[in-house]
Each structure stands twice: as structure tokens, then as C-alpha cells.
Amino acid sequence: MITTFVGDLRDALPTGGKLLGLDTGTKTIGVALCDTDWRFATAGKTIIRRKFTQDKGVLKDLIAERGVVGIVMGLPLNMDGSESPRSQGARAMARNLEDLGLPILLWDERWTTQAAERAMIEQDFSRAKRAERIDSHAAALILQGAIDALAGAAF
């Protein structure tokens, strides 16, 4: 199941369990995980993109290793909320991950990279460290937004 509605994700998930946040780009995939109570998202690693089958294998191993029950993927929208070619790429990636059997939420990721970079500058990360970790920090912001919405949703 792929959805853009947090309620649909909530209905498809068991009570609790870790969620995987993804910030997919053309060169890297930023990864984040949250705790089983859906309170805190934490930046994980950044995966260097290769062939899709290799990327999917890395994600599949991570899902199995961490006991992930759902995926939250960033959906890169234009500032006016319309979709772009990058949005279509994210949707294609979600369709390709659908056979993993986990519900997938596409979450509006506007401003997440900028917010992650600002936070990293405030924490005095060097340019090199920011470049290395920006995608995983953006994934954490995407995931945190979704789990905050899950916590606030009345079902």
C-alpha cells in the first residue's frame, strides 16, 4: 500500500513498531529510524545509490535487521504543492519497494533539506560533515513530521 494520507498509514500499521524514513535522491538515499512508540526519529546512514536492485537489497536488510513495520518516504513537491519530475521519481521508487510488503507513506518534504542544514550549522558541523550527513538528517525530519502527525491523528 502506498498512500499520501497519514490515516491510511495508521490503519495499515500494527500498534507501534519502528518506521523507516527515506530521503531519496539521484545519488544517495538518506535513512532514518524512529523508536517503536513513534516519538523520536533519529538520523541513520546515507546509502550511496547504485543499481536499484542493490539499493533495494540494502534497504531490505535494514528493514529485517531493525524490525521495521512501515516506510515514510519524502515526496519532493514544488513550492506551490504541485508535483515535479523528482516527485514522479519518488513515486516510482515507492512502487518498486511496495513488494517488500510494508505500508509506504509519501510525505511532503519541502524545506527538510534546508532545515536539516540549518540545524547542522547551528551544531557547528563542518561543511564536509554536513555534505556527508545531510540526507540522513533530512530523512529524520521527514520521519519526525510523519510520526508527529501519527501521534496527533485521532483514530
Image (spheres, helix red, strand yellow):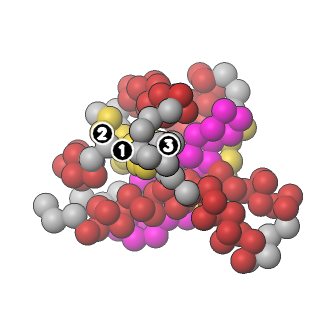
For the residue carrying disc 1, how many other residues have a C-alpha within 10 Å: few (<14), some (14-19), or many (20+)?
many
Question: In 3D space, how far apart are the residues under numbered discs 2 and 1 (Cα atoms)?
Answer: 5 Å
Residue 80: percent from the left, percent from the top? Answer: 44, 46
Q: Amino acid at mark 3?
A: Asn
SS of the residue under disc 1: strand
Mark 2 or 3, nearer chain start: 2
The residues tagged by marks 2 and 3 sit, at their Cα atoms, a distance apart of 19 Å
Q: Evaluate if marks 2 and 1 touch, with contact meaning CB atoms under 8 Å apart.
A: yes
Q: Is residue 118 visible?
A: yes
Identify the residue shown where x is 36% and y is 67%: 148
Label 2: few (<14), some or many (≥20) within 10 Å? some
Q: Residue furthest front?
A: 80
* Residue 107 in picture, x, y percent from top left: 41, 48
Residue of label 1:
105
Viewer-nearest of labels 1 and 3? 3
The percent position of residue 114, horizontal first and vertical second, equals 63, 60
Mark before the other along the chain sequence, 2 or 1: 2
The reply to whether residue 67 is in sight is: no
* Mark 1 or 3, nearer chain start: 3
Q: Quadrant of the rendered structure where residue 52 is? A: top right
Mark carried by residue 3: 2
Q: Which portion, as a residue range, is magenta? A: 19-42
Please tell me which residue is depicted at 85% across the width and 67% down the height of the picture: 126
- Residue 32 on the magenta span: yes
SS at circle 3: loop
In the displayed structure, would residue 125 be above or below residue 78? Answer: below
Amino acid of disc 2: Thr
Please report the residue visible at 51 percent of the width from the left and 52 percent of the height from the top.
110
- Residue annotated with mark 3: 78
- Disc 3 crowd rating (10 Å Cα; few below 14, some 14-19, many 20+) is some
Query: Is residue 127 or residue 133 the one in the foreground?
Result: 127
